[in-house]
Image (spheres, grey):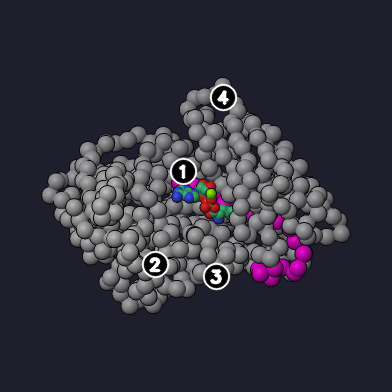
Amino acid sequence: WSKQIRLYSKVPNSLWIQGKEYPTNASITNVTSHILELSTRPLHQQKSHPIGILRKLIEDKLNSTDNAYQVYNDFKPVVTVEENFDSLGFPKDHPGRSKSDTYYVNDQNLFRTHTSAHEMECFGNMQRFATEWSRNGTEKPGFLISADVYRRDEIDRTHYPVFHQMEGARVWKRSETGTSEIRGDLKKLELQLAAESTQLIVEDDNSLDGNPKQDYMTDLEVDLCSKHLKRSVELVVAQVFNKKLQSLGHAGEKTLKVRWIKAYFPWTAPSWEIEVWWQGDWLEVCGCGLVREQVLQNASFEKDSAVGWAFGLGLDRIAMLLFEIPDIRLLWTKDDRFHSQFEEGKITTFEPYSKYPGTVRDVAFWLPSTTSQQQIHENDLMEIVRNRAGDLVESVKLIDEFRHPKTSRVSQCYRINYQSMDRSLTNEEINAIQELVRTDLTDEFQLTLR
Ligand code: FA5
Ligand code: MG
């Protein structure tokens, strides 16, 4: 954090989060009361919530092949900087660590930005619980972790500061029997995939140019492990989208286009992302790769003793598409007209109960002069609006920006779209919120309202 931004001038000395007290630090703490409230509502644990329904569907599918995955669904959202970043090899200057992107409780604790924050603990459990590390009936060579994750971001219909991910991982102990175990597991998976009624048309990218393998793995291990990873993710995609195609009555549509793209994550090599072609757009579903040896070692595996993969899948966008939920805020509504429409195990199409009219308010200001120490990150502005308007804000967009020809000061105008999912808003109510937003902006930043 090069620039000091005093975003929340009234940070309390400590915060109680899920039964634990954390000291705060005025220059680092940037978690808001809105976020604290959301963190008490883990949607993935609700059996008949779209996120919970989807989570269960995927877990059951992945465990249907060989029941290889230990399921974790109740990890608390506050983790250490070590768990979220350091243990995974994030460089010290990685942008994801910055205060403009991440909700910090203090300099050591943050709201996890991804489920990978729990990889270390779960790999550790896997290693610790297994004396003779093999499939002995009680020990599972894989895990699935679902959880709410937090990122400071823009505001619109597909972005919300909290979303949900599912982490998956699978490990094989290396042994004298070579790769026969991976090969056997892969065979089972391929048979299952072939039996799915939706067949995928896969554009793969197997070349390791610019996406190098790790030295300790053999070419054969890399080949088998990455195939097992890709087929596992494809199985999830095929099943989930098949359900949707069926419910749309597209009985004739039996194929789905997906593509694998090279990616980079500090704790996997090689790495990929998968995208699904859906209604004219590529939808990014998941990032993944072969787990770095160092990560397994950090989790107390003996050096070079195992090979494995991990993926991190976003649940919210898939749920919105499956259940036809037009605005991500609906996932968070408490309105029974939303909740009564969903049932455990079923993919149903959401029937909008009403679209309440929206109201627009603009806020325009001169930014601090360029010589000023203070800089404003767009996410900071988003946060001020969210903190005052909560779920009454549909979107915030920069609609105008210009530089004064003489003073070279920059003027910006943001358009705030207020709209409730559940009721009509009054002008007085919106005016009051807008006034608070304006006051916060001048209190927090050296800007001049226009
Ligand atoms: C990650 O978070 C990595 N932890 C994934 C991973 C796990 C890689 C294990 C390797 C091994 P990424 O930031 O790309 O990566 O997010 C993963 C998925 O979460 C995305 O593919 C997308 O489906 C979903 N996602 C990311 N950002 C958002 C967002 N703002 N809103 C909704 N879904 C999102
Ligand atoms: Mg990504």
Q: Nearer the viewer, mark 4 or mark 1?
A: 1
For mark 2, give the secondary structure. loop
For mark 4, give the secondary structure. loop
Boundaries of the magenta span: 297-317
Cβ–Cβ below 8 Å for labels 1 and 2?
no
Viewer-nearest residue: 237 or 289 = 289
Q: Which residue is mark 4?
A: 253
Q: Nearer the viewer, mark 1 or mark 2?
A: 2
Mark 3 to mark 2 CA distance (whole Å): 23 Å
Q: Which residue is mark 3?
A: 82
Q: Nearer the viewer, mark 3 or mark 2?
A: 2
N-terminal label among 4 and 1:
4
Q: Which mark is residue 3?
A: 2
Q: Quadrant of residue 39?
A: bottom left
Q: Which mark is residue 317?
A: 1
Q: Position of residue 91 (x, y in %)?
A: 57, 65
Please tell me whether residue 340 is drawn above or below residue 110 in the rendered image.
Answer: above
